[in-house]
Amino acid sequence: MPSISTVTVLGTGVLGSQIAFQAAFHGFPVTAYDVSDDALAAARTRFDGLAARYQADPVVGASAEQTAAALERLTLTTDLAAAAADADLVIEAVPESLDVKRSVYSELAASAPERTIFATNSSTLLPSDLKEYTGRPDRFLALHYANEVWRYNTAEVMGTAETDPAVFEAVVDFASRSGMVPIEIKKEKAGYLLNSLLVPFLNAAAGLLVGGYAEPEMIDKTWRIATGSPSGPFQIYDVIGLTTPYNIAAANPDPGSQAFAAYLKENYIDKGKLGVATGEGFYRY
């Protein structure tokens, strides 16, 4: 089984920064890559915020010393070749665009060592959509995280028909060693397990909203009371961040999806209300 000791994360947005910090918190040296100095400056702010959240969250109960050590294990760079030069595992968390991801993998394939395993965190694209651009389809799979990775710590591992079983096992092992619960998926499935359950639920809530049946607060209240769940669908949307559901809805020609995309754009996206990360979405934080 391949050994994974050094990790590189491509993309330092909301989820990419969490993936990087979680691995660093559990002892892995991590290189975080993004395309510009501005993006890296924003990443440093996110990492500092994550250190504070790990200390404040009773699920983790981290000490200041532990989070300081995690920050020390993080290296930030805008040089993709340098980022991949010594990586045992590269986790890609760049924007959810097929063209962007294929371009990144084409460049990455030319610079990463032959031993390096590539993993995509894509939530909507299958690894088969990308494998031919990696230059190593046998060492490529999906490793999908949920937002707030330290609390909702599933890591869905899903290969293609070409993924080497030993590589699959190595990524499952890495997930465990980085504080995650590996969810092994036997074959490719759009939406993995989590989103196959979650997306229809969120879409149903969106349909109730744009159909004029109820406001977000009432829909959430109904779900929480009737099921005992701690969060309703629009609270979940805020945690995810509204940019991702907007992009997915806008790309779907279904009239209901188009209506939801238009609603999000007018009422939230254009006003910078993107969810928990910006302090306001459907709710204020």
Image: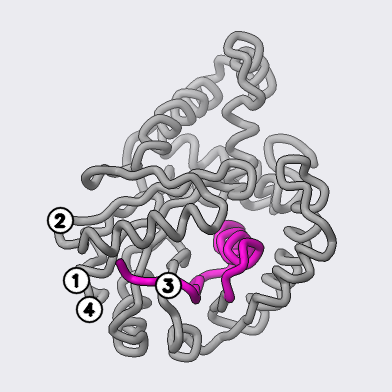
Task: Work out how far the residue at label 4 is from the one at label 2, CA to CA, in angstroms.
Answer: 15 Å
Residues tagged 4 and 1 counted as in contact (Cβ below 8 A): no
Residue plotted at (56% across, 86% down):
78
Task: Work out how far the residue at label 1 is from the one at label 2, CA to CA, in angstroms.
Answer: 12 Å
Image-quadrant location for residue 67: bottom right
Q: Which mark is residue 135?
A: 4
Residues tagged 4 and 2 counted as in contact (Cβ below 8 A): no
Q: State the extent of the magenta-drawn residues as a range.
A: 1-29
Mark 3, residue position: 90
Task: Work out how far the residue at label 4 is from the one at label 1, CA to CA, in angstroms.
Answer: 6 Å
Q: Earlier in the sequence, mark 1 or mark 2?
A: 1
Residue plotted at (43% across, 71% down):
4
Mark 1, residue position: 132
User: Tag 1's secondary structure?
Assistant: helix
> Where is the N terminus found, in terms of image quarters?
bottom left
Q: Earlier in the sequence, mark 1 or mark 3?
A: 3
Mark 4 residue crowding within 10 angstroms, few (<14) / some (14–19) / many (20+): some
Which residue is more in the foreground, 157 or 250? 157
Mark 2, residue position: 161
